[in-house]
Image (cartoon, rainbow, N blue to C red):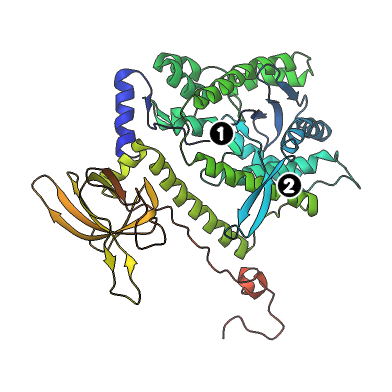
Amino acid sequence: MSTLVALARAQALAAGRAQPIATVRHLHVHDQPLVLIPLAMAGEANAPLAALVGDDPAAPRLLVVNQPRNRDERFAFFAGLAEVIVPYLDSFADATEAVPVDRGRDVRHRFVDAPQVWVPNPGGADFLRLLGRSTRFRRTDGDHPVPAAVPLLGQWLTFLASSAEVPGSALLVNAVQALGLHWVTGQSAAEDAHFGSLFAWITDGPAAARSAETGPVAGPATDPEFDNKVLAPLIASASPALVPELRALLMPTWDRMWRSIALLRDLPVGERVGSRWDSDRDAYSAYVAHLTEDGTPQPRRDGAVAAAARLQRLENAAARYAVQRAFDDPLVMAEHRLTGAAFGGVVTLAKADRIDDSGKRPVLRPRIMVATTETVRVEPGASLTSPSRPAQKAKVISVSPTVTGADVVLELSGGMGRKLVAEPGSVPAIGEQLLLTTLSEAYRPGAAFPDPADTPWTHGGPPLHHGDSAVE
């Protein structure tokens, strides 16, 4: 927990009111999301009991497994789930747009929109991941065939669960994480993990949160008391009262989900949220193309090279997401200012026409001085960036302590055009307030990984031939 989040939690507890920890929304909120509230049977690994699903707040569809241990009923449930989810996911694979690539010399195409699925909590996302793994390899012929839509549903759920691991992705969203990204409460992190309690704290305060703790669950796990006193007798007797009982259990969460989406939608959106949604649309477009051209299900586990490449993509996405949130939001950037990774000041000197002719050819290298009252923890030679000019680099030339703080001399490069005269407004003017940080959105090239066939046998490569030794 960061310093400012800890302070906000203390203020929330003292005031009895949730505190914002963001000034903008860091998440794309779709105009027509699909909400899915899964419910699992206690004591059975990934055994579905029910699901409330739909993209219309006024018309949810309830799917129920009357006998969760009955294989046929389970796959009938999966087929019913596929009837709702797959058409929704397919509905965005229609209109496309051209995207310039290779500096405008070529174009590629992607869909103009993509789906967005909401679940109440991380457990719901994990349930979908396990559900995808258990269904995407099912056969539609031979012994024990399943409906044709079931393995396709499994592939889609695996895709969505995989996208949820990418920081900043909004294809599969869990409400607990989305709300916690923008508000903090006065209760513990464990209590915040309860969707009903978290939502009640944010909207109505601590008293409402205490009441919600004992209210209907948000899944996928059910309440043990409900299991023993209500659910078990209804399943054992095959009572028709099971369906209305489960509907009554899930409807409060359904209403809170849509209210949470509306609450987040009302926040002003961050500037870089759109670019992350563009990446989601790219991922969706690529997966639709895969299903159309190949259609093979995702492997049970990645090979060594694929796993290393995926890990690097996730690490790069996490670093990029952290920088983008800070650049979009002063409250997030404040954390970096506390640690010395950023400081703000006013430009007191500026030489916009400075030319550096010490190299083979002259280059434009303006210098500015920034006076700051904040502690500066950067050394000469460090490279800084301003969120207002992300394409421009500022090299620290010197840091001189003053009575009120420090004067920092910076040499600028990039983001000023290709001539020896800076484009208007590209060099900070005297009197301009400037924020500078060690954070950067600069592109991070991927590592060069070997072909799987060239990796050692210990990492999934070809097996040793007879007579070869693993140790030379």
In the image, which disc is placed on residue 238? none
Q: In terms of depth relative to the viewer, which is nearer, 332 or 371?
A: 371
Where residue 414 sits in the image (x, y, percent)? 38, 59
Residue type, mark 2 in image: Val
Q: Hey, which quadrant is residue 30 in on the image?
A: top right
- The answer for how far apart the CA atoms under marks 2 and 1 are is 23 Å
Please tell me which residue is depicted at 78% across the width and 33% down the height of the picture.
74
Where residue 441 sits in the image (x, y, percent)? 43, 52
* Residue holding disc 2: 288
Q: Residues within 10 Å of mark 2 (few under 14, many from 20)?
A: some
Identify the element where label 1 is drawn: strand
Query: Earlier along the polypeptide chain: callout 2 or callout 1?
Result: 1
In this rendering, the answer to whether 125 lies above or below 243 is below
Apparent side of residue 192 relative to residue 384 in the rendered image (left or right): right
Of the 4 image quadrants, the one containing the N terminus is top left
Where residue 149 sits in the image (x, y, percent)? 82, 39
In this rendering, the answer to whether 44 lies above or below 253 is below
In the image, which disc is placed on residue 174? 1
**Is any atom of residue 217 visible in this view?**
no
Please tell me which residue is depicted at 16% across the width and 52% down the height of the picture.
407
Apparent side of residue 313 relative to residue 9 in the rendered image (left or right): right
Q: Hey, which quadrant is residue 404 in on the image?
A: top left
